[in-house]
Amino acid sequence: MSDQPQTVTAPGAAGHLLERARWAARAYASYSASDVERIVRAVADVAHAHAEKYAEWAVRETGFGVVEHKVRKNQACSRGIVDAYAGDDFVTPRVRIDDKIVEVPRPAGVVLALTPSTNPVATVFFKVILALLTRNAVVVSPHPMAKECCHDAARLLARAAVEAGAPDGIVQSIAEPTIPLVEALMGDARTNVILATGGTGVVRAAYSSGNPAIGVGPGNVPVLVDATADVRAAARRIVESKAFDNSVLCTNESVLIAEEAVADQLVREMERAGAAMLSADDAQRLRDSMFPQGRLDVDVVGKDAAWIAQRAGIRVGPRTKVLVAPFDTAVPEEPLTHEKLSPVLGLIRVPDASTGIATARAIIRIAGAGHSAAIHSADPGTVMRYAAEVPVLRVSVNVGNSTGGSGLDTNLAPTMTIGTGFVGRSALGENLQPKHLVNWTRIAYNSDPAEAMPAYAGLSPWPDHHAPVPAYPVPSNDERAPRSHTPAHVDALVDRIGARAGAGGVSAGDAAFREQVRRLVVEELSHLIKG
Amino acid sequence: MHDYDAFSFDSKAEMLEKSAHYWNPDKTRFWSDSGIDLVIDRREGYLLWDMDGRRLIDVHLNGGTYNLGHRNPEVVAAVKKAMDRFDVGNHHFPSLGRTALAEALVESAPAGLTKVAYASGGGEAIDIALKSARHAMQKRKIVSIVKAYHGHTGLAVATGDDRFAKLFLADRPEEFPQVPFNDLDAMEQALRGRDVAAVIMETIPATYGFPLPDPGYLEAVKALCERYDALYIADEVQTGLMRTGELWGITKHGIEPDILVSGKGLSGGIYPIAAVLLSERAGAWLHEDGFGHISTFGGAELGCVAALTTLEITQRPEVRSMVHYIADRVGTGLREVQAQYPDWFVGIRQNGVVLGLEFAHPEGAKYVMRQLYELGVWAIFSTLDPRVLQYKPGILMTPDLVEELLDRTALAIGRAAADPALSRRRAS
């Protein structure tokens, strides 16, 4: 074996953060399914209970997005995620009797979770819960623009996890993220997998780090409305989706491609739903304002439509939710074909569905490969051609794409991290989900029928955990203190309840019973604390 | 040829010969006779390499000096950088480094400790502590523990085992009475005359094999000190700096000592420094005559930088958590080994990563030490109780190294148990 630590690049305290995470990951990898369920539930509950607080905080700190929509994302990424995976077990070994294979889960270890400025706390919730579901330790590295709300949220989840019995240090976060520090954390051999959500730069850096990485490319979502669509419903869905969180999600629609036959009706319906259709002159004003020197001015990211219009010198009604800017040619030098991260939707008219599909291909050629596209259509043939020809890995149909591609309003895996696959320079082609953070050791028997596989059902190598991990280092001769140390107030409660129950005929000295009561009390207390 | 830039040796044999000839014949011979032919060459983290290239995991740490590992990169970087501006400094004047470190130490310490005096090593620091106590209390007697170890300087050596005090005719039993460890009656007896300036206690006596204070013992000693008007000096040289899972071991007992002494690990193993933390009462001489204790190298400013960096690293919440994990894993692992050899491996004394392993033979630890050495682990027996092996994992040990250490330890303990020489002696 090597005498040198492999690649220790994270300096000082940051390195120790990874080292602590490694200890925590080792401990947590031996937790049972019921331990994990209890911990994940506790963390999701506390996250859910604080959805509003962090939605407000994130908008205040970053200036991006809409509080009420961030509340929804925070809720979806806390209890929502846990409910979505309620039936899934990433802990108990799986027995495949017919294949004579038993699969034993092996967590990744230390997950380095990079979170973006646009979906800051929702992504923290999401990645932390994914890591906890799969018995990983997680180190959150927030985007510097959102570091305060994310760090605070991560610490809250860390406390909730440990209160519920998770190992100390299972959730940690970086208080002062800087580019060199994050690069050092990514390159350090103590990081087992990087989950990179953010700009292209950070994703490429993750893949260059030498460590396993799941990084995803940017979106630039085309949405095609063909002549068979329910135009009214499509209009409403597109406007709502485009307005969702002021369009900071990578799944928000970027370019609307309308088949000429229904385009006028679509525009009218969209105006009714809160969109403002810009004239060619106003569209130019908007280009000049939003894309100085042809590049997106990040000041508009996540701002509302009225703010953006006013800055561009365009008059719109006060209740305008989305600005629709028409353009004619889907080529890279047209700024409106690029990702906008704001409630501005490019609109291009096409004579037929085939041209629409070709136009969507053109949009994706400019940016957003492997990400998402949407279509509003009643014709499965068109949908199939669209999916086959446009190089994206998810096509949402007859639904707003912001919540469609991210699985909140479709049955895709609910996620804050959209895999863009090989075509989008990513190792991940699906929506990021718990299964991506765990490997399975496969016990494989001789396939010869003469060699039988014995029964494995019910065999689990993971015991339940009821005491803090690690145990507090009490001196080994101190019998007053139990080896597993529980806060004094819990012990006092246990004694009181135990004495009461003892009077009812159960022996209060019974260790198993006491343990059960202790667990109940700890759970109850943690609920109280979470309020 | 072994070339070390500033000097070189043709071979290890030549080196050992010269070591005996020019340096310390008895010490050189002692290790050869003990079957430990170690000449430490390369060193990094918790690993040592002998001159002949053999790799050893270090769980001796020279009494905790290498608590943060050998040549800890952060400490090395800080001292290297400091050398572009600082040297040892001039002890006559207010000093940048000493002041900054003093503030950091006081902030880290139990309440009531407000001043810092510096030494160049632990023995001198103990001398400062004893002198401070005598000045403050205007009494001469210092009570210590039988088999205590506080260093080899003028006063410190008198508080320790006879072996070192008598060698240099430095034993002064009338001024330095000793009482058995964990014996409160004896302690009270010693204090009852109200003529004692201070009781000096290692929080866990290291060289005696880390016998743990009985629960409540140290607290009761502190109470006796208060009753009989003596100061309590906590020698935290081996129990400080997070080795018990808290920065200062004494705080786990809820004790606010009048004086606290730190050394060894405080240097980061890079630049010698030791410190005495004093209460206002114990540090009264600093108001009266600030030149009362002079030490040219005490609190050398480069050492202050090493110590500041060491303190910062040691106080990280991540590091505290890691120590708890290491202590937990090592304790669990050793108990598993003990279950295999219950008649041989008879005791585990543990507080954090301070461990004494007891074996059922008057010199049992020497046998285990030799087997460990053969198996690539360096741990030392307790000089004053060779039944007990001092086993001191570092506070930054990685999970993999801890597991490797436990594997090697299990093998060594098993081999020592089967050592024919040992069974012969046990039988006799």
Image: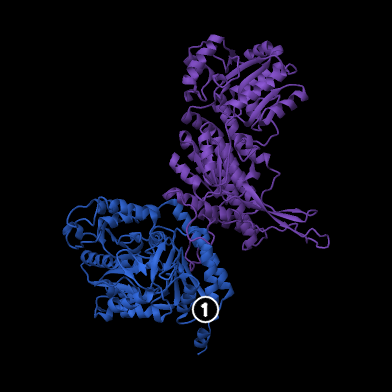
Residue B89 position (above or below residue B353): above
Q: How many marks?
A: 1
Q: Which chain is blue in the picture?
A: B
Q: Quadrant of residue A268?
A: top right
Q: Where in the figure is residue A110, as x and y percent of width and height?
A: 55, 49
User: In terms of depth relative to the viewer, which is nearer, B224 or B341?
Assistant: B341
Name the quadrant of the N terminus of chain B: bottom left
Q: Where in the figure is residue A284, as x and y percent of width and height?
A: 52, 13
Q: Badge 1: few (under 14), some or many (20 or more) residues near its Cα, within 10 Å?
A: many
Q: Residue at x 50, y 46 (%)?
A: A187
Residue A122 position (above or below residue B151): above
The three-letter amino acid code for the residue at tag 1 is Ala
Q: Please, which chain is the residue tagged with disc 1 on? A: B
User: In terms of depth relative to the viewer, which is nearer, B308 or B190?
Assistant: B308
Q: Quadrant of residue B189?
A: bottom left
Left or right of B252? Residue B407 is right
Q: Where in the figure is residue A326, as x and y percent of width and height?
A: 59, 14
Left or right of A42? Residue B216 is left
Colour of chain A as rendered: purple
| Residue annotated with mark 1 | B416
Q: Residue at x 65, y 14 (%)?
A: A349
User: In terms of depth relative to the viewer, which is nearer, B232 or B326?
Assistant: B326
Residue A281 is at least partly visible in this image: yes
